[in-house]
Image (cartoon, rainbow, N blue to C red):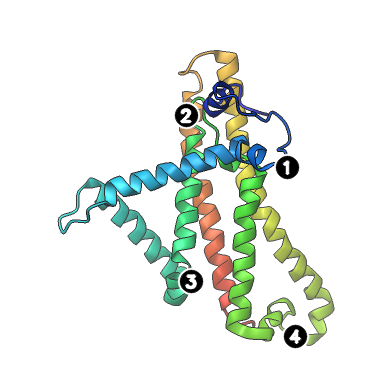
Amino acid sequence: MEHPILFISIILEKLGLPVPHGPVGHTLLEQLCAPYMTYTWLVMAFLFIVSKLTLGNLEMVPGKGQNFWELAIGGMDDFFSDNMGRELTDKFFPMIATFALYIACANLIGLIPGFMSPTSSINTTLALTLIVWVSHHIIGFKEHGVGYYKHFMGPVWWLVPLLLPIELISNFARLLSLSIRLFGNIMAKETLLAILFMLAGSFFAPLPIMMLGVLVSVVQAMVFVLLTVVYFSQANEHAH
């Protein structure tokens, strides 16, 4: 279900640019004008501008903006190091922290009337999931070499025929669990809000659902990041 009103779609129509209302086309312009892509650029611009304004001049006595970022970045750094070790944190902190900030903002932007969450598109969530899935296998092979295959073989050799298919299926299932969980929850929030706006015709009617949407948006960002940390940590550990 598409939003009844999207501000960027209105702007594209005024500029005479194509506004896709169905499957995304194959040309570069059609792909860049897809709603989930245009709102992705908007979230990226928001994060860049806000961080630039609040961290442009670092001070010994931090202001409110610098305090927020020190709390957020410091909290994530402590959490990552506690759960996957300092070595992995130093290597992958920029990527995982970027995912956390992007997903949280992308989820929350859909609560603003006329905007949509890029994470309500399976294209966005699957792209993020593929990066995580490929990265955690790279960690495994880099840490253990060819011996990384032991993670999928089970504790004893005679259980290999049973456990190997189960482990492979469960590992590939991570692609679905990460992407569809985030997509499904945010899409449900977007659809419910769109229906309430159309039926009620008032901004205040969906407020209770919007308050719940804030909680869902933050929790889903935390779940995605938590599972990413768990996958990275497991790939780095020795097989039992």
Q: What residue is drawn where x is 45% and y is 77%?
A: 87
List x then y, in percent, for residue 144: 61, 84
In the image, which disc is placed on residue 26? 1
Labels 2 and 4 touching (C-beta < 8 A): no
Vertical arrangement, residue 149 with respect to residue 136, above or below: below
Q: What residue is drawn where x is 72% and y is 76%?
A: 152
Label 1 – label 3 distance at C-alpha: 40 Å
Residue occupying the far top of the picture: 201
Q: Nearer the viewer, mark 3 or mark 2?
A: 2
Q: What residue is drawn where x is 34% and y is 49%?
A: 51
Label 3 – label 2 distance at C-alpha: 35 Å
| Residue under pointer 2 | 112
**Type of the residue with mark 3:** Met
Label 4 – label 3 distance at C-alpha: 26 Å
Q: What residue is drawn where x is 84% and y is 78%?
A: 161
List x then y, in percent, for residue 91: 46, 72
**Type of the residue with mark 4:** Val
Q: Nearer the viewer, residue 168 or 101?
A: 101
Mark 4 nearby-residue class (10 Å; few <14, some 14–19, many ≥20):
few
User: Considering the image in quadrants, where does the C terminus appear?
Assistant: bottom right
Labels 4 and 1 touching (C-beta < 8 A): no
Label 2 – label 4 distance at C-alpha: 54 Å
Q: Nearer the viewer, mark 1 or mark 3?
A: 1
- Work out whether residue 31 can be spotted: yes
Question: Element at badge 2?
Answer: loop
| Residue under pointer 3 | 84
**Type of the residue with mark 1:** His
User: Considering the image in quadrants, where does the N terminus appear?
Assistant: top right
Label 2 – label 1 distance at C-alpha: 29 Å
